[in-house]
Image (spheres, rainbow, N blue to C red):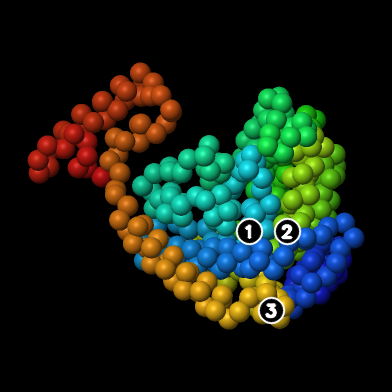
Amino acid sequence: MSELSGLAGPRAGAQADVDYVQLLTPEGVRVENDAYEFTGDDEQIAGFYRDMVLTRRFDTEATALQRQGELGLWASCLGQEAAQIGSGRALGPQDHVFPSYREHGVARCLDVDPVEVLGLFRGVDQGGWDVVGSRLNLYTVVIGAQTLHATGYAMGLERDGLVGTGDPERDAAVVAYLGDGATSQGDVSEAFVFSASYNAPVVFFCQNNQWAISEPIERQSKIPLFKRSSGFGIPGVRVDGNDVLATFAVTSKALEQARSGSGPSFIEAYTYRMGAHTTSDDPTKYRLADEVEHWRLRDPIARVKVYLARSGGVTQSFFDDVDAEADDLAADIRKRCLDLPDPALVDAFDQVYAEQTPYLVEQQATYTAYLNSFEVDGPESGDGVR
């Protein structure tokens, strides 16, 4: 266990007085923990490194696309790659995820095409990926609402007999991703109440990145977040969210317990949002540069790279190949994002329900007639007016 006093930063206050689970230090040194263990090999750790590098490059390219006017908005996950990859790679083949709006690394772990994520922020669709096949629900912008969705889905799994059977090919669990700011929302408290009361197989994974937009965490909670869930009867644990090994180990154990029928749990991944809350935010208005620099020295990718280089688990060619793959990924997503066709406004009516209702059919026809009332070049049928 490591003391947070050496990690929490310039304005940590009471939040710094708590130990947390750490298995890989910022210096790239493996350490032991009495309750959690990472049993994987260097090949698996190298896979984590690749995942994190590619997630960061996708995130960086998406930010650039927004700045160039190609996306309406972007929510960066810069600095939170270990929390997302570690937890995402812990998911089992039947587990389902309910994200907030910056779980780009988790989307990668579930094989969601990154351009489908960009389509949502470009405004060409309302989320184009297959939520059933990928097991990743659509991004949720309403703060904390996804925790209720996750709890309901988890309760359904239990009632369908998909929890606690002892069959690894049958038992399933749910992960609800939320930020530290979401813990101040009533929806999250209600999700805690229902999940605890009904022993729902759900893991609440909170990425405490220290800032709920412009409000620091200590303004929201006088105690560490992982202790708050115990008031609802849900066990909580704090993990070094910049340590991909610890995050994987802690999430794996929580999911195992949920699948076995032991009920919900709460994980606080103690990390840091290196960038802006979204591209509409200016973090220099509310936080100091020395705080950002403090956390830059605890970069989740750098510590894994140091470990791999020191352990001899990979050669320099591995790092070069990952960098080249990242370049190719950036070029590919940029091209395919710019090639996304603009939607016709009338198509929005087709995306509300799986089967269109008579009321929506009537609305669509009325709106199409309205669009066609404008004088444009050639017949439109609702396609030409954007």
Location of the C terminus by quadrant is top left
- Residue nearer the viewer, 367 or 33: 33
Q: Residue at x 56, y 76 (%)?
A: 319
- Disc 2 residue type (three-letter): Thr
- Residue nearer the viewer, 198 or 183: 198
- Disc 3 residue type (three-letter): Gly
**Residue 247 shows which numbered tag?**
2
How far apart marks 3 and 2 lie (CA) works out to 23 Å
- Residue nearer the viewer, 167 or 367: 167
Mark 2–mark 1 CB contact (< 8 Å): yes
Q: Is residue 302 something that shows in the picture?
A: no
- Disc 1 residue type (three-letter): Ile
Please, which residue is most extreme toward the right here?
34
Secondary element type, mark 3:
loop
Where residue 179 appears, as percent x and y from the top left, is 66, 53
Q: Earlier in the sequence, mark 2 or mark 1?
A: 1
Location of the N terminus by quadrant is bottom right
**Residue 85 shows which numbered tag?**
1
Task: Find disc 3 in the rendering and name its residue.
Answer: 312
Mark 3–mark 1 CB contact (< 8 Å): no
Q: Report whether 212 appears left or right of 115.
A: right
Instruction: Tell me where residue 311 sits by quadrant.
Output: bottom right
Secondary element type, mark 2:
helix
